[in-house]
Amino acid sequence: MNQKTDELDNYSQAGAKITPQGEDGGFHQSWYPIALADEIKPGEVQGIDFLDGRVILYRGESGKPYVSSAFCRHVGADLSVGKVMGENIRCAFHHWSYDVTGKCTHIPAGDDIPDNARLFVFPTVEKLGIIWVFNGEKALFDPPYFDGLEDEELEFKSSFLIDLPQDPWVLLSNSHDFQHLEALHDLIIHSEPSDIRQPDPYHMEADIIFEDKNFGRMEQFQRIFGTNILTLTGTMQGQTMCTLFGGKPEPGNKTRGFMCTATRKGDGTPEDETRVQMVLEMGEAFFRSLSEDDDPIMRVARFRNDNLSSSDWALAKYFEYVRTFPRAHPSKNFIT
Ligand code: FES
Ligand SMILES: [Fe+2]
């Protein structure tokens, strides 16, 4: 039997229900893009919808970003209207202060600090122009990167891409949906992956060669991180071209999508800097053109997966990966 038939058979036998995000056990345990790095300056705080609740993102005066539950553990004021004090956040209402571990460290009235006066603090990193948070007490795997390339070697451009009323994993299913690459996006698939690899429970990998009428031939190594991040590392018209999509789940099973395009840094000459900027613009334009094709479909689709056909063998494997992906919601009592 070839992999196509095997995957489809396994999938039918497995039973296909994929629980929506937020139900029975919470959300997939992944890194989520919470904001663009340049949306927040040192000493600033803002409130953000995340998972099924609300968090704050602030930068300490050192510049380091922190993401924690939004509601003060005293009587529930929203800390997004609080004040950054050094690396701590102070509530606007009665001035209780919380440190970077989420612990309340000061009550100006002089009262004893209750044991429960603690925020939920998410593992947080800033990478590729995006601030990422992990849904868990501790990260289970590394935040996204482009294979074989250090961030320091790259010139990159990150931006907001799209808001859509679907769970992130539904949008990511596009990456394994080879039927739609040809039908909807009009791409020519030169080499469909001969295998889809799952090196551990948190990633899927494949190699793919395709061609777009406007952007030319692309040879790409594709990796999925969690169920909401896609990276493509490879070449477009012979130039190093890396693209990333990351989706953040929001209340109501919605997704806010961010993207990043990257290429190798230039050699410092004006000609090479122009080339680098052109590659970045081309990568972004390609990704945005795909997103524009997908938008009207994803805006109104009601996802189901009980009628896959043999061309959907990779999609079947992806659905099985998503269905069994670790889920948790340790911040539930803090952010909702
Ligand atoms: S509600 Fe935050 S200090 Fe009282
Ligand atoms: Fe698509």
Image: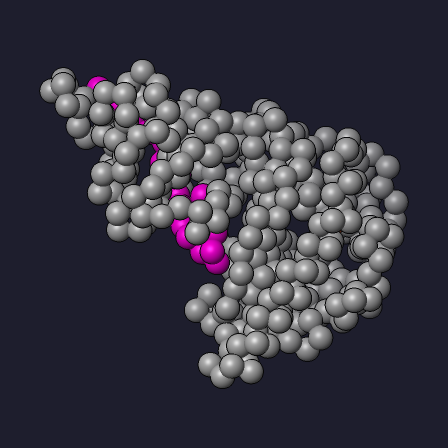
Q: Position of residue 210 (x, y in %)?
A: 78, 66
Q: Is residue 62 above or below residue 18?
A: below
**Foreground: 134 or 130?**
130
Q: Is residue 124 left or right of residue 237?
A: left
Q: Is residue 278 above or below residue 287?
A: below
Q: Is residue 3 above or below residue 327?
A: below
Q: Residue at x 46, y 29 (%)?
A: 54
Q: Residue 305 appears in which quarter of the rendering?
A: top right
Q: Is any atom of residue 171 visible in this view?
A: yes
Q: Residue at x 59, y 40 (%)?
A: 256
**Foreground: 158 or 69?**
158
Asked whether 255 falls inside the magenta stretch, the response is no
User: Colour scheme used in the picture?
Assistant: one colour
What is the residue that sits farthest to the left in this orientation?
110
**Foreground: 46 or 229?**
46
Asked whether 131 falls inside the magenta stretch, the response is yes
Q: Residue at x 49, y 84 (%)?
A: 269
Q: Is any atom of residue 137 visible in this view?
A: no
Figure disc tally: 0
Q: Position of residue 221 (x, y in %)?
A: 65, 65
> Which segment is the magenta one?
114-133
Q: Position of residue 240 (x, y in %)?
A: 61, 73
Q: Quadrant of the N terminus?
A: bottom right
Q: Position of residue 311 (x, y in %)?
A: 86, 51
Q: Is residue 241 left or right of residue 13?
A: left
Q: Residue 100 appears in which quarter of the rendering?
A: top left
Q: Residue at x 14, y 18 (%)?
A: 109
**Foreground: 100 or 3?**
100
